Each structure stands twice: as C-alpha cells, then as structure tokens.
Image: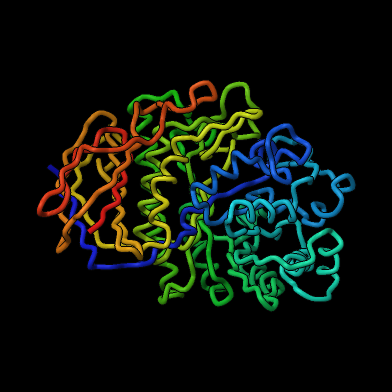
Amino acid sequence: MSKLVVNVHNKKSRIHKEIYGHFSEHLGRCIYEGLYVKEDSNIPNKNGMRTDVVEALKELKLPVLRWPGGCFADEYHWEDGIGPKESRKKMINTHWGGVIEDNSFGTHEFMELCEQIGCEPYINGNVGSGTVREMSEWAEYLTFEGVSPMADLRTKNGHENAWKVKYFGVGNESWGCGGNMTPEHYANEYRRYQTYVRNYAGNSFYKIACGPNSDDYNWTETVMKIAHPFMDGLSLHYYTIEKTWDDKGEATKFDEEGWYKVLSKTFYMEELITKHAKIMDKYDPAKRIGLIVDEWGCWHNVEVGTNPGFLYQQNSMRDALVAGVNLNIFNKHSDRVHMANLAQLVNVLQSVILTEGDKMVLTPTYHVFNMYKSHQDATLVDSFIETEEIGVEGAKVCNLNESVSINDEGKINVTINNLSATEAYPVEGIFVDSKIKSVKATILTNDMTAHNTFDQPNVVTTKEFTDYIITEKGLNFTIPPVSVLHFEIEQ
C-alpha cells in the first residue's frame, strides 16, 4: 500500500488561478466555428459567441484567455480587425492552412468573448512584423480613458469606455515564427517595445516577455540578464509528442508503449520548470517575475481527412492524464509558475471542447480542468506520495502523481493520477494533525484510448467515487488504472 502524506499546516505558495488558463489562436476552427459563429448564425449565440461553448467555459471558471496567437500574433495587425466588418481587410493566414482570414473576429469581439466567459484577456502583441507605434496604439485603444486619437477611434467603433486589460505579451516565439531572433536581439527589442505599452490611469499591464523554446536555457539566461527589470513574466513553450515532429503519433490509436512514451515525455515539464526557474532565481530571487507556460499540451497527428494546417485532433484518456500531470506540476511550482495556457481551447490540439456544426463535445481534458478548478487561488500545502517506477523500456514514469491545496474555507483538495495502464493501487492517506469530517470525490477513468465523439459524447465523463474509507489517520482508498481522482475534504 502506497502512503500519501498531507500536512495542511505546512502552507506553501498560492496557486494562481491563471495556471488554469487557455489559449485561442486564429488557427483552424478554434475561433471561427469553435468560439465565434457570427451574429446571423442559426447556432444559438450572443453577439456571435456560441452560447453552448461559453456556458461550458464558464463552468470551468476559465480565468484567463490568450489571443490572437501563437504564430498568428506576429502577422496580425490589430487595426485590420476593428470597424465595420464589411470593410475590414482580409488577409492570408500564412502559418495555418493558407486560408483567408476576414478579420470579422477582432479586438471588440475578443473583449466581448472574455466578458461573456468572465475571464481576464491576455493580448499577445506583434513584434515580428509590427512596429512599436502599432503596439503602443493598441494599448492606448484598449485602455486609455479620455480624449486621444485611439480612444476616439474606439468610441467611433462603438465602445466608449476603455477596457481593463491586465496581461500583455510582447511578441511570441521570437526565436522562431515570431522573427527568428537571437536572444540578445529580442531582449533589446523587448526593452524598446514594452516601454510604449503604457499604463494609463486605471489600468496596469502585466508585461510578458517571450521566453524559451523548451530547453533553450541560454535564451532564458540572456533575456533575463538584459531585460528582467522590465518584465513581469517570461513565457515557456513545451509540447508533448509521442514520436517525432514529422510523425507525432495518433491521438486515439496507440498501445501501452505509446501510452507510456507520451506520459514520460510530459514529465519533462518538471525538469524544464526547475531548470528555467533556477536561472530566473539568479536575477529575480524574490520570484516577482512569473514563469508563464502559455503553450503546453499534447500535439498529435491531425485526424484523417482534415486540413493538416488546422491541427484538429481527438482527445483520449491519455490526454486527460497529461493534463492532470501538468496541472499537478504547475501547482507544485506555483511559487514561480504564475500562469499556464493549454493549447488550444476549441478544435485545435489538446482542446477542451470539440464542435461540429451545432454539436458540441466536452473532451476528457475538459473534465480534468473541471475537477481541478477547486485549486484556483487556493494555497499549496505539503504533500508526498510513495511511488514505484512503471512503464516500458525507454519510457518509465512514476505510477502516482498528486498535488494538494487548502482554500479559504478550509476545504482540502487532493488531485491524484494513476498512470498505470493496467494496475489499481491501494493508498493510505495520512493527514498530519487533521481530523477528516466528510469527503466528496469524483473520478475520471476508462480505457486508455477512450474518447468522446459527436455520436457518443459521454463515453468519458466524471463519476462519483466511493471506494474510500475515512480512518483515524486520514483516508484510505484504491485508485483504478488510467484515472484522475479528486477529493474535496472537510476537516
């Protein structure tokens, strides 16, 4: 029997609710058809935003949404997406499928979407093909309350009052699709651009610099050295793939080897955060600057018959476990990780929602986010679980993975994953100097390739979990294979 030890009296960092953030890029059917169907659509909507999708995202308590990219951000010119829709400039989406982008979803529409969901907007500005003036004027258009050219233009376009925008990213993947820059060049460009993303009265930007691609530690070292006094956050991008970038592996057709390969690769996130955080500590020992993991998740081959540039993929119990593992990692590093954004929200990569016409499906990953939402703004507490190594040759993982928090009401939230494809594990939960009064538990479990479709939308869904016993020491339970388990405990 594995021991889970929890000491709620040893409180650690606050788990920023923004760790449970998401990402929406002008890519495939994420924005158009997924989030936005235009005002004249037969699909129920409010000002063009799909009602069913918005309601599902509100249920998640989605805290922050990143837009417009991604690679698209550094070819997006915001003034093309304002004003009368019939006169907005059309463009080629060169990164994603070469399709026509009609700019009918722009700044006003994104801010409307965030208002409907109730989340913070995270705007990603254009450094790669944009100008300092363009970025400066976007900040003014969004947030200046008074008389100015951009405020007047915003009023002319139907929104007299300024918006509140907290998060602003200065460029995206500037080491690659955002300009192929060296870290020295980007760091100096960041210093210049961010100067003109001004804090007008009533609004204060949290400015996020472009951080490394995966394990590019030199990028972090250089950008932090040159630009750390001018940033509030530094981004990190890492995707979990089963095989190679040329052949990533299938979303739902895999064996145990494919199961363990993906899970072992997603644990690399722990090493990345630890090593990048150590570099950040040299320049920011007080941990003022957040590590912003604003692109993460599984990247599989696209579904057969779909546009390869649209990155549409299915979502199985394997993706659910990837989500659970990463969210536990982020929770445990919440002293440095201040935000994370799953890629992407709808119909793209490891999405939480799939749509097809007027149909909508909640993916296994959606259910994990719904189970974990109780960690938002709670306090991480000390926890440890005994584990054993499982897997296949070249792809080993620990069998169990957890994180624990306590909220302002004193409720304890435990999230634990069983990564075994075949084995259940009995667990003895020891809660130090705590007396458990009551427990509510939910579980997500099924076969490892199980997934939801438009014809069978509830194959994978959460259920009440009752296989536990409250003891003098705490809580004993048996966790099934291929499962994500959540306990809400009152003491």
Q: Of all residues shown, which one is farthest toward the right?
A: 87
Q: Residue at x 84, y 58 (%)?
A: 157
Q: Of all residues shown, which one is farthest toward the front?
A: 437
| Number of marks present in the image shown | 0
Q: Where does residue 299 sit, x and y in percent of width and height?
A: 51, 38
111 and 349: which is toward the camera: 111
Q: Quadrant of residue 321?
A: top left
Q: Where does residue 436 sit, x and y in percent of width and height?
A: 19, 55
Question: Can the viewer see residue 38?
Answer: yes
Q: Residue at x 38, y 56 (%)?
A: 375
Left or right: 19 as drawn, with respect to 102: left
Left or right: 438 as drawn, with respect to 332: left
Instruction: Relative to 108, say whether 98 is above or below.
Output: above
Q: Residue at x 51, y 30 (%)?
A: 314
Question: Can the viewer see residue 396?
Answer: no
Q: Where does residue 263 sit, x and y in percent of width and height?
A: 36, 39
Q: Quadrant of residue 50?
A: top right
